[in-house]
Image (spheres, rainbow, N blue to C red):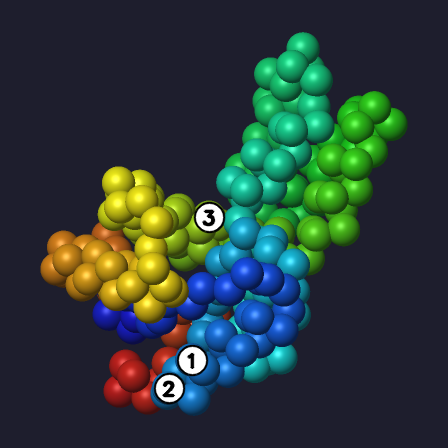
Amino acid sequence: MDKDGRKDVLGLYIGEDEGANFWLGVLTKLQNRGVKDILITSVDGLNGFPEAIKTIFPKTEVQLCIVHQIRNSLKYIASKDQKEFIKDLKLVYQATSKEIVEDELLKLDEKWGKKYPIVLNSWNNKWENLSHYFKYPYPIRKIMYTTNIIESGHRQFRKLTKTKGAFPNKDSLLKLLYMGIQNAKEKWTQPVHNWSQTISQLAIFFEGRLDEYLEL
């Protein structure tokens, strides 16, 4: 999302091994192409991605997608417990402040930790990158807590490729996806709702880093 609050796609990259080295290469290319700074990234927990981001853009705040974390957690919760677990989990990810959320996470651990240790260990181990969004007001939270913007792009890509069969090479696939992006960008004309307030809040939280773009 750019300084005007509009969605954009900065690049398409295809790799068989999406590990730390792959993401390091992607981010290096973005930097070489002129990306000077990224305030916040929202990622879905791919191996090596947060570390790669911090290597190339050390000031960037890395937020893990809460929606992905919830989905992954439910894979390990018995169906008979899922309704009650989700009810308790909502008190965590919908909390109004980081102080409240950490109390609720502790209660969640006390109640479910022994029965589902793999789930609670995941939340605790990833907590630093899961919890950044709690310090922000709602307009910023809404943008950063999930990777839904990216997922909507992926759905458009799947519509393009599912009826095409096999591709002769990687370049032919990239060309199709590129054209799909260009078509999609024609609809991305409106900024995020209430963007003027959101960008003003970001300018305060990231003091000095937006001055060049906002002419402050």
Q: Which quarter of the picture shows residue 209?
A: bottom left
From this view, report whether residue 95 is shown above or below residue 48. above
> Residue at (55%, 42%) from the top-left corner?
68
Q: Which quarter of the picture shows residue 175?
A: bottom left
Q: Nearer the viewer, residue 90 or 42?
A: 42
| Callout 3 crowding tier (Cα within 10 Å): few <14, some 14–19, many ≥20 | many
Relative image position of residue 29 (x, y in whole percent): 45, 82
Using residue 208 as the reference point, say whether residue 172 is left or right of it: left
| Quadrant (top left/top right/bottom left/bottom right) for the C terminus | bottom left
| Mark closer to the chain start, 2 or 3 | 2
> Residue at (33%, 68%) from the top-left corner?
171
From this view, report whether residue 203 is shown above or below residue 176. below
| Mark closer to the chain start, 1 or 3 | 1
Which SS class for mark 2?
loop
Residue at the extreme front of the image, as rendered = 168
Residue tagged 1: 30
Give the number of the mark in front: 2 or 3.
2
| Callout 2 crowding tier (Cα within 10 Å): few <14, some 14–19, many ≥20 | few
> Residue at (54%, 78%) from the top-left corner?
25
Using residue 149 as the reference point, say whether residue 208 is left or right of it: right
Which SS class for mark 3?
loop
Distance, label 1 to label 2, CA atoms, is 5 Å
Distance, label 2 to label 3, CA atoms, is 26 Å
Relative image position of residue 164 (x, y in whole percent): 26, 46
> Residue at (42%, 67%) from the top-left corner?
13
Q: Which quarter of the picture shows residue 200?
A: bottom left
From this view, report whether residue 46 is shown above or below residue 165. below
Residue 34 makes an appearance in the image: yes
Residue tagged 3: 146
Residue tagged 2: 33
Is the residue under label 3 in contact with that under label 1 (CB below 8 Å)?
no
